[in-house]
Amino acid sequence: MATTTTTTTAPAVTSGLLSLEGSYGDFRDEIRNKGYAVVKGAIPRDRAAAYQQKAFDWLTSFGTALDMNDPKTWTAANLPVQTKLNTFENYCVVHEKFMWDVRQEPGVVEPFARIWGTDELLVSFDSLNVTFPGRSDKPPRKPWPHVDQSPLKRGLHCVQGIVNLGQAGPEDGSLMLLPNSVQHYDEFWDSQTDPKDWEAKDWRRFTEKEMEWWTAQKGLKAIKVEAEPGDLILWDSRTVHWGGEPTELSKTIRTVVYASYSPARLALPEALAEKQRVFKAYGATTHWAHDNIFLRPVQAYLPDGTLDPRNRDEPREKPEYTDRLLKLAGMKPY
């Protein structure tokens, strides 16, 4: 009787799109070595403050009792629908003029151009984060450590960005991460997981037990990234990170715009077509600019499952659709 042998084929792994080897003498060395960097003053403080005010104006434009200066009004009933991550991505906010103005700030785009070696970039259609401290109706969320890159991708594929429009001090909401975790990324997947469980999805949360490998075995300690208005926080998507909640001592409303850029040449035709569809729908995508593009729900639903009557079919204030904007959006070729 013949013996049947079953073999398991390892999943295909894609190598990195970019190498930051060498010495640059700037923030790129920090991204390579620690997995993150803070670019100071990417936007002048006065413009950052003006953008923050635009975000506040948008929040108070829904006809509720929301008062940005009165913490008693910082409740879900007075806010447009917000995800559990403190982000806003419905009501076409992703394509508001102030959001596109932030994305086109030279000091925001230039570091990504330096990273990738080209200014022919696409930008993500990412969300607005406004985190109110001390909300009585929303207790702080527990950490959700994760990476935004599949184990099927090795090396650097995506650099994410946070544009700080307000202060992010030690007590305030900000990005939490494990410095140097990028150095152990491959080892974690190869030693702590089964390749059969690897998914192509570029998002993976870590369990408490898995986090013990990063902290106890590798000796990594989480930090909260501190930044000032106008600073740009950059990090390699392989860096273990999550959104840090404000402490009970914080009085600061966290206000940030997420923005990631990558070369237009990296986008496959089908990804570009989907990006164009999302743009026309005034929709939101993921943290990636050239890949992982799909239309997130445009309409907002209330907690009871009904459609929010405050839904918007287009931005409150549309941007000027310049050649630069349309190229960043993938609507026009370089």
Image (cartoon, helix red, strand yellow):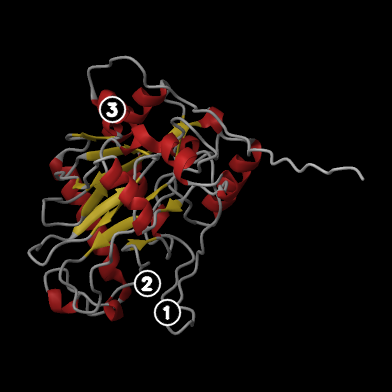
How would you rate the neighbour count of disc 3 (Cα within 10 Å): few for under 14, some for 14-19, many for 20 or more? some
Mark in the foreground, 1 or 3: 3
Distance from Cα at disc 1 to Cα at disc 3: 43 Å
Per the model, the C-alpha gap separating discs 2 and 3 is: 38 Å
Type of residue at label 3? Asn
Q: Which residue is mark 2?
A: 81
Task: Check the picture and name the quadrant holding the N terminus.
Answer: top right
Tag 2–tag 3 contact (CB < 8 Å): no
Residue for badge 3: 33
Name the amino acid, label 2: Val
- Looking at the rendered structure, the number of numbered marks drawn on it comes to 3
The reply to whether discs 1 and 2 touch (Cβ–Cβ < 8 Å) is yes
Q: Point out the tag, 1 or 3, that comes first from the N-terminus.
A: 3
Asked where in the image residue 38 lies, by quadrant, the reply is top left
Left or right of residue 17, residue 218 in this image: left
The numbered mark at residue 302 is 1
